[in-house]
Image (cartoon, rainbow, N blue to C red):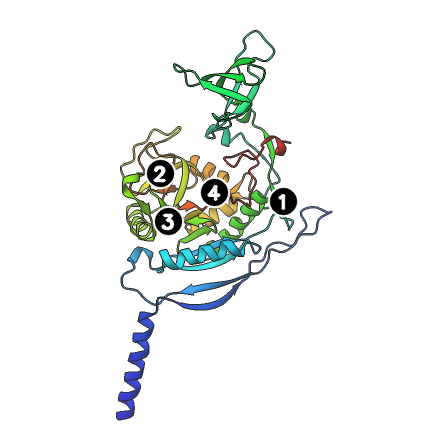
Amino acid sequence: QQQQQQQQQQQNSERCERSRSPRRRTEVVHEVVTPSKPAQPVQEIQTPPKVHHSSTVFAPQAAVPVELQRLKAYVVNLDRRADRWARCEALLQKETPWLEYERFSASDGSKMAIPEEEICTVWNTRKKGNYGDYDEWVYDAPGTERDCVPWRWKGQEPADDDREWSFVVDNDNCDAAMVTNKLTKDTFKVKKVFAERYRTPGRDQRMSGGERGCAHSHRRLWEVVAQRSEPTMVLEDDVQFRFEASEPKLGWNDGRVFTDRLTLALREAPRDWEVLYLGWSGWRGGNYCILEEKCHAKAVRKAEYVWTTVAYIITPEAARKLLAIARPMDQPVDEFMAWEASQGRLKSFVVTSEGDGDDVWAGGIAAQNDFIGDSDIQKSDGGMQGDSCDSFAV
């Protein structure tokens, strides 16, 4: 009887010790097999690298809301970007210690051949043209050959300290401006218009290697999600939970805000939701482009057409639906998902932070770390990073 009491005391002590430990680490290997059929006769298709990663398993925590207890995250990370993985893992351990996560080895579009039956090589901007910001400055010179000839994209206007050009917007018309060459003193007028050629008939663009690798990574991950029974969180390795809130008075978002707001969003979301964007930019409830619906929820809004795949939650049903359509994926992955949502085929919503008013273009409870300065993906249609869309034109 004394021996039984001693064994019971030892077991209780071990359970107590485990309850104080925030996590138990186990090493696992997850391998995703893709078709080995060559997409091009002159290229050898390489199977995506095995997903060697660590999985973090947590001891039961009564404090974790029931809505989050079965949630698991996969972090998409290139094998050559160990620095990003280290930063992201430290973030997860500090800000969301309740979250189980795995590293998912990304497809490297710069080093491997990606099957064209899964990801296209050329895409057309026609679909995006209905929602994308294709505003440009053109010469305003009626009666001359230069009239309406493109000058620069909106956002690429000369800065005040530009040595060559002076750019002054008209006080009465923000879509008109006067441009002066500081060296020659020559002046000309420009006006801001929508670049209709990107919508009708659309422009064929070669998808960059980074875009194809990113799209292939998410497509492979959807294959994993489709086999699971619960919604899955997908994170890219530049995700950030600590950033300044949209409303400065609210201070900084962090893991606590992320956890609380996500819990509220899952409670508010309709039962048949399929995708929840945790970080986003673009058209959504309160700021639609075409839709004319009203949205009264606090933490979730219907997504009409939003960009970025830095952080989202997807259901197995949605993953299977996207896989059935992506044969091949005919746009960069965020455009592909956004278009399906805009057509009503994917029930997508954005999670809003407390300060995300209707006038906020980009928001959510997650952001991208160093979005402009540290990107592995060239944007074939330009983008805020300043990539040249002309260099990818067919």
Q: Are marks 1 and 3 in contact (CB under 8 Å)?
A: no
The residue at 53%/57% (across/down) is: 82
Relative image position of residue 182 (x, y in whole percent): 54, 18
Residue denoted by label 4: 371
Between label 2 and label 3, give the one nearer the viewer: 3
Cα distance between the residues tagged 2 and 3: 24 Å
Q: Is residue 1 visible?
A: no
Relative image position of residue 316 (x, y in whole percent): 43, 52
Residue kind at label 2, given as amino acid type = Lys
Mark positioned earlier in the residue sequence (4 or 1): 1
Residue denoted by label 2: 302
Instruction: Name the foreground residue: 330 vs 250.
Output: 250
Question: Element at badge 4?
Answer: loop
Residue denoted by label 3: 242
Between label 4 and label 2, give the one nearer the viewer: 4
Residue kind at label 1, given as amino acid type = Glu
Question: Element at badge 3?
Answer: loop
Q: Are marks 2 and 3 in contact (CB under 8 Å)?
A: no
Q: Residues within 10 Å of mark 4 (few under 14, many from 20)?
A: few
Mark positioned earlier in the residue sequence (4 or 2): 2
Residue denoted by label 1: 116
Residue kind at label 3, given as amino acid type = Arg
Looking at the picture, does residue 280 appear above or below residue 390? below
